[in-house]
Amino acid sequence: MLHFTPRLAVVFGLAFALQPAAQAQQQRLTMEDAFLNRSLQPQNLRQLTWIPGSNDEFSFVRTTGGVDELVRGTAAGAPPVAVPLPKFSSALQGVGAEESKTFPTVQWQDQGVLVATQKNKIYRYDLKSGLATRGFGYAFEVDNVDPDDSKTRLAYTKAQNLYISAAGRENEPVTNELNPAIVNGQAAHRSEFGITKGTFWSPRGSRLAYYRMDQTMVTDYPIVDVSSTPAQEKAIKYPMAGDASHQVTVGVYDLGSRKTVFLQTGEPKEQYLTNLSWSPDEKFIYLAVLNRGQNEMKLNQYDAATGAFVRTLFEEKDAKYVEPQHPLQFVPGHPDQFVWRSQRDGFEHLYLYSTQGKLLRQLTKGNWVVTDVLGFDPKGKEIVYASTAESPLERHLYAVSLQGGKPRRITQGHGTHAGTLSPSGKYVLDSFNSSTTPRTIRVIGVADGKPLQTLLDAPNPLTAYVLGETKLFPIKSADGQTDLYCRLITPPGFDPAKKYPTVVYLYGGPHVQLVTDTWLGGSNFWMQLMAQKGYVVFTMDSRGSGNRGRAFEQATFRQLGTAEMADQLKGVDYLKNQPFVDANRLGIHGWSFGGFMTTTMMTRSPGTFKVGVGGGPVIDWRMYEVMYTERYMDTPQENPEGYKAANLLGYVDKLQGKLLLIHGTVDDVVVWQHSLDYLKKAVDQGVQLDYFVYPGHPHNVGGKDRVHLYNKITQYFDEKL
């Protein structure tokens, strides 16, 4: 079992930290505040970035006197240089752009040139001359726009095809696919395995690798659009657990020859190709090739010019599953070495390899996980990363030598640090927040962690609001061995002699961590609003959730919902032992995996909760997507008992209390049929429950309608709890 020895009880008295003058804090949050009022979010520095190729210069956008300006500063502390929006916009207007009311998103082509995009046209602004030029453009209404590192080439998709644009080569087709079921240049494998895009430029931009995803063998699934009369059916390709999956290959387009070769990734065709990496010399492509069973991974090398398989560098196997999520990171100055991230020893750590597949050394080790890699110093002597080494609730930045040795902690102060590394590797832009600190951004030295500049010390945006107290603490899991971290929010003016209704908010699924030492303890404004209304609000990260290591996550393998429920019931036991919790008025709410867990708790532990609200719930894992479900459950054919135990249709008749299910009608993640099947089963068995749909919304209800959604949820708890 896992054993952690962080601070065992982390308690933050936000009632005091966030209320320096009690008489001034009379305002209460509205639902519009909770979801639409951006002024209540901690201040930030927009577009904060290091300038590539510079002597450790950075830039960000701020608003001064109501006017946006781009600020340019140096780590050494030289006075910042500002480019006012009127000057920038006027220069772009001079070459055909429209006036910008706010500073547009810009990228640095080099330390003297900014690149901006407006209405499918590329504009370049020279900081020295103050002049702009108009570059190439691309086709109207395109998707997946991906520039190369030099910002002189673009890849993008339109429908199922892939295009590039460069000077003199606008809207050049890379593919000419007529079948809409075969898509090019888009993220494959339903964006699992760390996949976020479908195009990959080589380091110098001479070649473009891309996913080609053949979905012709995948079953069509109907999504009904009711925005027109009559309603229109839109069929999507949705591979359900146990069914045929799509087949993916990787093409490599040579911009010089205008020819494409495909990597010879071999059989079987139902496999997962992920973590695509280019070698620094552009000669090779590396792929993590994962079998459909997801328990065997090969890191393969391919010839980028011919597509030929070169070698397998190494393999990783696990009795349950392997989940590669990160590409290779090559060491500067050492093109024959790279760092690989793996949880092969039980926790996500860094491993230094040669390109011949030889393990040179494990760089990090311990009962904690690496959560991010910021980069290397230019000479490739050390690597800078973020991890949970201090506590699962915190994130700190560290550096470790590639020659081995003890990591050096860079950041200080309990809480959560996120950083970006300067071009020289000497400095970090450290963005810090904690349960009591809204946001602080500093330039710090990598060698000693010394703060050199404070770029932002955000004020508390909630000083006018009365908030309750938020506490973070651990309890033991159902196995009695593992710490589970909890967050408890009590109402303003809390009276421990009173009995309060209590709402449990949960998720519980992989890769998600809800309880962290971040602003407001990781809670959102709706939770704080509920506390203002007189509720106690409780959240716990059960086994199966993220950033705690392999055994913690794999505790749910082949039995989703079972270990998570056991842990959540330990949380209920904790609540019932608090004299201020009314055990007869417990409610529960979650979305997606949290909707599955809400419905699980209401029916597999009937009577525990009086009221539940489940949004976008998975009801039957047989109907969820192949990649995610089979990782955690194997196939329905291999694990029929596990699927049966997790299928909530089998527990409808056990429902006690009031349950409201909510679904978006065009949900293409957890398809609408999940909750509709649940309704049908309830009708068949004479079970009463409540239901609400959001027409035209996908898996999440966003925009102004999110206010409506949470008014609906809150009203349900008010009426029933």
Image (cartoon, rainbow, N blue to C red):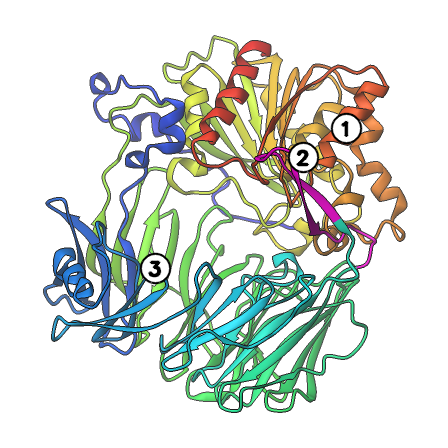
Q: Say which label, 3 or 1, has the lower sequence index.
A: 3
Please state the extent of the stretch shown in magenta in the rendering.
221-244
In the picture, the quarter occupied by the C terminus is top right
Q: Say which label, 1 or 2, has the lower sequence index.
A: 2
User: Mark 3 or mark 1: which is in front?
Assistant: 3
Badge 3 local density, few (<14 within 10 Å), some, or many (20+)?
few
Q: Say which label, 3 or 2, has the lower sequence index.
A: 3
Which residue lies at the image location 59% right of the left edge and 27% below the top edge? 589
Q: Are marks 3 and 2 in contact (CB under 8 Å)?
A: no
Identify the secondary structure beneath mark 1. Answer: helix
Toward the viewer: 410 or 67? 67
Say which residue label 1 marks.
Answer: 678
Residue 214, located in which quarter of the rendered image? bottom right
Q: Is residue 441 above or below residue 702?
A: below
Which residue lies at the image location 37% right of the left edge and 22% below the top edge? 30
Residue 711 location in percent, x, y? 48, 21
User: Cα distance, mark 3 to mark 2?
Assistant: 38 Å
Say which residue label 2 marks.
Answer: 617
Residue 293, located in which quarter of the rendered image? bottom right
Identify the secondary structure beneath mark 2. Answer: loop
Amino acid type shown at disc 1: Tyr
Badge 1 local density, few (<14 within 10 Å), some, or many (20+)?
many
Residue 258 location in percent, x, y? 54, 87
Badge 2 local density, few (<14 within 10 Å), some, or many (20+)?
many
Say which residue label 3 marks.
Answer: 119
Toward the viewer: 73 or 389? 73
Residue 395 location in percent, x, y? 44, 53
Which residue lies at the image location 64% right of the left edge and 76% below the top edge? 250
User: Cα distance, mark 1 to mark 2?
Assistant: 10 Å
Q: Are marks 1 and 2 in contact (CB under 8 Å)?
A: yes
